[in-house]
Image (cartoon, rainbow, N blue to C red):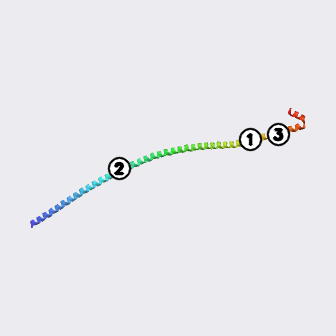
Amino acid sequence: MDSLRSKTAAIVGGSIALLALQGYGWMSTRKAVDERVSSAERQFQSARAQDEARISQLVSDAVAQQMENKALELKEFQALVEKLKQDDTQTAQRLRRELATKANAQSVKQFQDDATEKLGALSSQMRTMATNWWNCDGEASATTSNLMSTRARTSPTSQTFWFS
């Protein structure tokens, strides 16, 4: 029995030692796995921070590039607006000149029309006056002839006086 006790004690002691070794193995494996997981998490966080920094830099660069493009577009737009203002000013001046020229042309045409009308009226009046004068001259000649013939019939001496 002693030997049974000693064998049992040896088996129990060996089993406990085996369990202790297995527990130690699990603990060290767990510790190694925890360390590896921690290391992987740190690497992941580091990579994530680097990625975030890189993304931030890329976004910053993209925004800066867009701002430069917008500034360039704004300058081009301002130049276009300035050119359009100049074109508008030149067009307005040209239209004013054309309008003034047209107004002058219309004034000249109106003056010519008025002058033609007045000259026509004056010419018509002069024709009427000339016709009247010729008619009066003819009447005066007839009257003079009649008067002379009447005097010639009434007094022969006056005829010589009148013609001399």
For this orientation, the residue located farthest to the front is 153
Q: Which residue is mark 2?
A: 54
Tell us which disc is closer to us: 2 or 1.
1
92 left or right of 114 in image:
left
Residue 93 point in image, percent of width and height:
57, 43
- The residue that appears at 26% across and 55% down in the rendered structure is 36
Q: CA distance from mark 1 to mark 3?
A: 22 Å
Residue nearer the viewer, 8 or 83:
83
Q: Which residue is mark 3?
A: 142
Q: Secondary structure at mark 2?
A: helix
Residue 18 position in % (x across, y down): 16, 61
Q: Amino acid at mark 3?
A: Ala
Residue underneath mark 1 = 127
Q: Distance between the Cα atoms at labels 2 and 3?
A: 128 Å
In primary-sequence order, the first of circles 1 and 3 is 1
What whole-number distance in Å separates the C-alpha atoms at marks 2 and 1? 106 Å
Dot 3: element:
helix
- Quadrant location of residue 105? top right
Please report the residue visible at 82 percent of the width from the left and 39 percent of the height from the top.
142
Q: Amino acid at mark 1?
A: Arg
In the rendered image, the quadrant that contains the C terminus is top right
Mark 3 crowdedness (10 Å alpha carbons): few <14, some 14-19, many ≥20: few
Q: Nearer the viewer, residue 38 or 129?
A: 129
Residue 125, quarter of the rendered image: top right
